[in-house]
């Protein structure tokens, strides 16, 4: 009886451990990754007031950025950036979250550069998400700033364990904005981030976390 109890306990422990993802698990091809889209929870948008004058304007802007990730998915190649043959698309998760925000709070009219979104602040953002029962590893881009005054967009690329709502790891990016039209101007910084991942950042992460880095 004692041996049976020990065996059951060992099996339960093994299952529980298997459910807890680590940074290294991001790079194992047997673990599918879910693309959660562009999150604006703590974004600071410094844009011409005439372009984003109302709550509806800002909500539309956030929606259009995420819609672009799907309509031009070959350009915004998150699959290639993650060195995968495929990913699970669940951009509606961030779209719904963004809809719950008071969008006017995101628009900053000061000419001064606001504080950077800190890594510690991401934990509360991820905890606030409803992943709609999805489990496994997800990745989202958490917008830090779209700053017209300096012509740059900054954001966190955040890998999460959706079941535990915990962050596996996150990295901060800064890209120069370019292009015509407000949507395309700021979407170019997301494209630049994806391009940086494809050019070497993803492989840097792979080597770093293979060695047990934090």
Image (cartoon, rainbow, N blue to C red):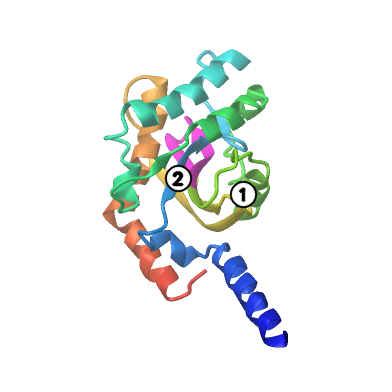
Q: Left or right: 113 with respect to 71? A: right
Q: Is residue 174 visible?
A: yes
The residue closer to the viewer here, 187 or 64, is: 64
Residue drawn where x is 27% and y is 53% of the image = 199
The image position of residue 58, as x and y in percent, is 56, 20
Magenta-tinted stretch = 139-154
Calculate the distance from the C-alpha at mark 2 to the C-alpha at mark 1: 18 Å
10 in relation to 126, above or below: below
Residue drawn where x is 42% and y is 34% of the image = 151
Q: Residue furthest front?
A: 1
Residue drawn where x is 48% and y is 72% of the image = 213
**Circle 1 crowding by C-alpha within 10 Å: few under 14, some 14–19, many from 20:** some
Q: Quadrant of residue 110?
A: top right
Q: Is residue 158 visible?
A: no
Number of the label disc, if any, that sits on residue 34: 2
Looking at the rendered image, the disc whose residue lies closer to the viewer, 2 or 1, is 2
Q: Is residue 142 magenta?
A: yes
């Amino acid at each position: 009886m004692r041996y049976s109890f020990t065996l059951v306990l060992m099996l339960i422990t093994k299952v529980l451990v298997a459910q807890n993802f680590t940074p290294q698990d991001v790079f194992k091809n047997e673990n599918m990754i879910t693309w959660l889209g562009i999150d604006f929870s703590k974004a600071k948008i410094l844009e011409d007031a005439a372009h984003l004058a109302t709550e509806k304007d800002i909500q539309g802007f956030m929606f259009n950025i995420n819609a672009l990730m799907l309509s031009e998915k070959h350009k915004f190649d998150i699959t290639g950036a993650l060195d995968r043959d495929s990913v699970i698309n669940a951009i509606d998760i961030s779209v719904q979250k963004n809809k719950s925000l008071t969008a006017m709070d995101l628009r900053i009219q000061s000419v001064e550069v606001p504080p950077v979104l800190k890594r510690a602040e991401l934990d509360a953002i991820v905890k606030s998400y409803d992943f709609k029962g999805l489990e496994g590893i997800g990745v989202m881009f958490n917008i830090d700033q779209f700053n017209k005054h300096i012509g740059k967009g900054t954001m966190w690329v955040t890998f999460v364990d959706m079941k535990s709502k915990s962050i596996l790891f996150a990295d901060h990016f800064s890209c120069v904005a370019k292009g015509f039209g407000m949507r395309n101007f700021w979407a170019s910084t997301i494209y630049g981030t994806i391009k940086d991942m494809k050019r070497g950042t993803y492989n840097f992460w792979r080597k770093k976390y293979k060695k047990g880095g934090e």
